[in-house]
């Protein structure tokens, strides 16, 4: 059964406190368990990777790396309609991320040329969750931004099914994307393998992609050794709706997010008692336990709560949704208007579905090309520009006690002929 | 005394292995010690913050937060020439970061409007190291990108001197930048205070800035709870130089980086035995112990080594330096040509001196406006666009077993009048 909350008399902070969601990947227990796994894989490589795989997934894949022919077979076996759907998704995700791509630039000021060289990472690792289900869409949503950024080496880790093999639909997508390096390895141990490298898995520069609490905690654990993207925990949706929204559609949107189960959260914020009452009887089964219907004073309060909560997804299903978008300050993705159900972006609209959860949207963003690039700053001074700036730098360096810093500049200023 | 290495017969990987630098912030001992400090501050707030401060800095600042009048006094007491030098630095750093700033955008495809809203973080925390010295320049290099990004709330933590007070030059810069929230608190305990909040220090959304191994490890420890920038460990410089470089200048550049001591690394990569022999006698004192002179076959090999090493700074002091820049694939900052000593960017050229070290330049970049922004993706579908994409999404959702996802889309397609 869905929970109900009357927030009309409550402060936004109090509402967010009551909506408190699970962030298990930050718990001491999960972090400690994962630390152990990471250490073992770091020290013992494949041996530990396979041992933990057997313990957690019940199988010992052999070979660990999926043969290229298996990927090719899976791609060839993909039914035509699914292949077309995936191709459409890939194209939309590609177009969206081409638009957001940062480019190298240069500027000149008083004889100094300054700039930024934007470069792709050399090698990135993508984690695609599995186990209960298979999420080939996640490979589209993580690999395409990497490819748009220009990353040449991509490797994918995904837990094997009971037969010890990676999911064939996932392999089919790897085939469509031209990715030939897939390992049937999951969990914290797979993250550790990508971070430190093992006999079978060459180390990567950065690890991205969603996973369960252990996978996410493992990414936090190896951060610093390699790069990682923002933590992606259980799914979240906040629907901001007024009396103009249709109860049956809002109910489906809430149920859609909640059917992820395992910690998922769907919240309706509405000033319309009629909408809440219309939605409630349409919620059923286990997903409904993940849904909270919140009665608010007005859309103003709804947006205040949403901004503090900083959810993965916001759906603005209200009059003036376009204007409301301008007031969203923290969210991974915003769906605007009734005709934009979040499910569109989960699969094919363009933005990645790899999004910050658990309130991390306060400081983190959707996965994108930015995750697969570095910016190398550079400078080139002319004699004139050096003469202009040099004395300031020498003064500041001496104040901080760095005589050689000052001298390295002065040496260039003094020798006019050099 | 500087070390020498003949790398002409060695593989680049082997050279990098021999140049192995300290990355103490990743050591098990430092991480475990820091975990304890972070936990204590999380649980006991100011009490633990002050206790650890007393233990590590030997003082118990009272008040913890620097009074605004003290900042104002420090600003007023800044000698004119230093004020002018800082203003020049601030202006250059501002101009550089205005250029790299990402902007919101929107695109339309077949009736779907997709875009990205780029927003500043609400509140960021800046760590400025202290203790042995004071680094007011670090406040310029971290706060200005945040201000350009539009962050409204900035707080600064810096360890107090023996008198229990924050360094007056640092406070003066805070005054110049209009920053009124400074705490005389340092170390891992200050990082924890900003991450979780204490009675005196309101929590922040993200923590940036360099520090010692404990500070850096603390940032790794709190990552996930809040955002953090890339790890910034001991300073590093790789000089790529040929026979055209002047030994006395190269020696000063190497000494300048090495005078940071505490783990700093300066490396000369040169095919010119004459240059190496000219530089060697000019290196002296404790900094020289941090310097390695490496003889390489040619500039080709030098760049290969540099790219694998992925240093904080590269100085290209050779013929064709501009062309060589195009081949640098991993570095925080590249100084191009003899007239561009790295010290210029340490203080005032424009790019931030908060740079990735320890090889993290493989996946991390200089601090910049990107660190202080989030990108909120959004989408708005028309009926036509929904009709086009809907069937693909429904197919993919059903394949992954998410019936409500499919239904939430189908409900909008079926009701033509809605």
Image (spheres, coloured by chain):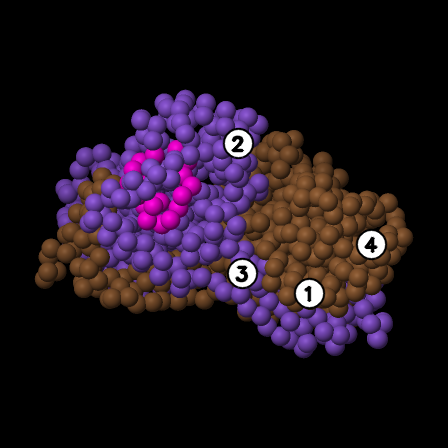
Chain colours: A purple, B brown
Q: Return the residue at label 1.
A: B321
Residue at screen point 76% across, 44% down: B262
Tell me the SS state at disc 1.
helix
x then y, percent, for residue B352: 63, 60
x then y, percent, for residue A145: 41, 54
Q: Return the residue at label 2.
A: A199
Query: Is the residue at mark 2 from the same chain as the one at mark 3?
Result: yes
Task: Work out which quarter of the rendered image holds the N terminus of chain A and state it.
Answer: top left
Q: Are marks 2 and 3 in contact (CB under 8 Å)?
A: no
Q: Which residues are magenta?
A: A166-185
Query: Left of A321 or right of it: where is A122?
Result: right
Numbered disc in front, either 3 or 4: 4
Which chain letter matches label 3? A
Quarter of the image for residue B42 reads top right
x then y, percent, for residue A284: 17, 37
Q: CA distance from mark 3 to mark 4?
A: 34 Å
Residue A261 position (above or below residue B416) = above
Magenta segment includes A297? no
Q: Return the residue at label 4.
A: B273
- Of pointers 4 and 1, the one earlier in the residue sequence: 4
Query: Is the residue at mark 3 from the same chain as the one at mark 4?
Result: no
**Neighbours of disc 3 within 10 Å: few (<14), some (14-19), many (20+):** many
Q: Return the residue at label 3.
A: A118
Task: Work out which quarter of the rendered image holds the C terminus of chain A and state it.
Answer: bottom right
Numbered disc in front, either 1 or 3: 1
Which chain letter matches label 2? A
Q: Are marks 4 and 1 in contact (CB under 8 Å)?
A: no
Residue B191 position (above or below residue A55) = below
Q: CA distance from mark 2 to mark 3?
A: 32 Å
Tell me the SS state at disc 4.
helix
Query: Is the residue at mark 4 from the same chain as the one at mark 1?
Result: yes
């Amino acid at each position: 059964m869905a929970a109900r909350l009357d927030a009309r008399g409550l402060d936004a902070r109090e509402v967010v406190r009551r909506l408190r969601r699970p962030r298990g990947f930050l718990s001491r227990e999960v972090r400690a368990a994962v630390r152990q796994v990471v250490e073992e894989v770091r020290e013992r490589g494949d041996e530990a990777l396979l041992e933990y795989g057997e313990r957690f997934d019940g199988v010992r894949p052999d070979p660990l790396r999926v043969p290229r022919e298996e990927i090719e077979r899976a791609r060839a076996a993909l039914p035509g309609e699914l292949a077309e759907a995936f191709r459409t998704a890939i194209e939309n995700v590609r177009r969206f991320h081409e638009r957001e791509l940062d480019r190298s630039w240069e500027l000149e000021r008083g004889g100094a040329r300054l700039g930024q060289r934007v470069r792709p990472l050399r090698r990135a690792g993508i984690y695609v969750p599995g186990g209960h289900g298979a999420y080939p869409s996640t490979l589209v949503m993580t690999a395409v931004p990497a490819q748009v950024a220009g990353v040449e080496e991509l490797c994918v880790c995904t837990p094997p099914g009971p037969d010890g093999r990676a999911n064939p639909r996932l392999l089919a997508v790897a085939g469509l994307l031209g990715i030939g390096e897939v390992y049937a390895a999951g969990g914290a141990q797979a993250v550790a393998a990508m971070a430190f490298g093992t006999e079978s898995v060459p180390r990567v520069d950065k690890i991205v992609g969603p996973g369960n609490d252990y996978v996410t905690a493992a990414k936090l654990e190896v951060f610093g050794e390699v790069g990682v993207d923002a933590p992606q925990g259980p799914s979240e949706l906040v629907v901001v709706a007024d009396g103009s929204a249709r109860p049956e559609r809002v109910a489906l949107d809430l149920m859609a997010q909640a059917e992820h189960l395992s910690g998922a959260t769907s919240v309706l914020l509405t000033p319309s008692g009629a909408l809440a009452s219309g939605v409630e009887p349409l919620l059923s089964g286990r997903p409904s336990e993940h849904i909270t219907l919140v009665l608010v004073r007005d859309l103003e309060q709804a947006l205040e709560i949403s901004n503090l909560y900083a959810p993965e997804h916001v759906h603005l299903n209200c009059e003036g949704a376009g204007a409301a978008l301008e007031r969203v300050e923290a969210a991974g993705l915003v769906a605007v208007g009734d005709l934009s159900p979040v499910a569109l972006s989960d699969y094919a609209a363009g933005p990645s579905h790899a999004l910050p959860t658990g309130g991390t949207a306060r400081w983190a963003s959707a996965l994108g090309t930015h995750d697969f690039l570095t910016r190398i700053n550079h400078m080139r001074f002319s004699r004139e520009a050096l003469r202009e700036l040099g004395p300031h730098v020498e003064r500041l360096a001496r104040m901080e006690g760095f005589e050689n810093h000052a001298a390295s500049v002065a040496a260039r200023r003094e020798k006019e002929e050099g």
